[in-house]
Amino acid sequence: MASRRVPKVTSKEGESQCKEKHAVLLSPVGRLEISGCETGLHEIKLPKMSVLPNGAEASAGCEVCEGAEEMTEPLKQCTAWLRAYFCEPARTEQLPVPPFHHPLLQRGVSLEQIPVPDRCTPIAEMPTDVCWCSSNGDSFTRQVLWTLLRDVKFGEAISYQKLADLAGNSRAARAVGGAMRSNPIPIIIPCHRVIRSSGQTGNYGGGNLMKEWLLSHEKLQKEKLAY
């Protein structure tokens, strides 16, 4: 697919704008559009699900149907991670998280200081004693998204209130909802695992059907892995 210039994502302050590449994956939940540059992943765009997949569709793989010839290394890592998520969930804990290159996810910590995920750290090896917030931009949204990625595992669910507690502000449950809506990397940063305290699933960028499907997929796969 043709590349385009991204106005707000740069590899380093003061350097030229990065060159975005695109790919499309056919997944059990529809076409996933991923974009990124040589530095990292920019975005995952979800389709809107109008019907739940049937048995055959739900067991289908996750394959690149567009853009395979121009994929950067972060896009290849993203593809491998998503394929594992849908087809071999146990592998996601061992696979590296693709490096992220989106302004909302940039932090004020040095990559040389700690082994953060955008140096391809598997989720299982992410540090648990690091504050991910930054003095620039929406630091609480950033804190919430990194906390979600690090602490809420496959097959688990967490309430907006509990995630606010984990992110350091127990009175910010509504702000957590805003952070979920802002998430540029859904599925990998698992905003579908954040539900209401009542147990209702709540809203989701890909629609409620997709959120329900993802939660059911994880529950079923986790039960299979337990045997």
Image: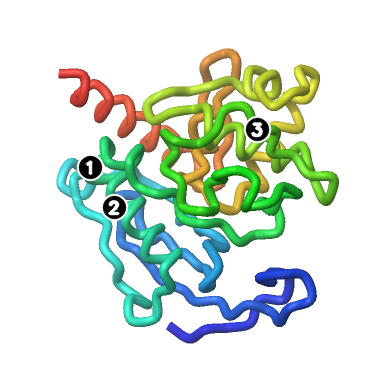
* Residue 7: quarter of image: bottom right
Secondary structure type for disc 2: helix
Secondary structure type for disc 1: loop
Give x and y (percent) for residue 202: 57, 29
Q: Which numbered disc, 2 or 1, marks the residue that appears first in the sequence?
A: 2
Q: What amino acid type should be assigned to the residue bearing mark 1?
A: Glu
Secondary structure type for disc 3: loop
Left or right of 85: which side holds 41?
Answer: right
Give x and y (percent) for residue 47: 45, 56
**Residue found at x 57% / y 63%:** 42
**Residue found at x 54% / y 64%:** 40
**Alpha-carbon distance for marks 2 and 1?**
7 Å
Picture mark count: 3
Identify residue for label 2.
83
The label nearer to you, 2 versus 3, is 3
**Alpha-carbon distance for marks 1 and 3?**
29 Å
Q: Is 86 in front, or is 30?
A: 86
The reply to whether callout 2 and callout 1 are in contact (CB within 8 Å) is yes
| Residue 130: assigned label | 3
Q: 167 above or below 72?
A: above
| Residue 88: assigned label | 1
Give x and y (percent) for residue 56: 15, 47
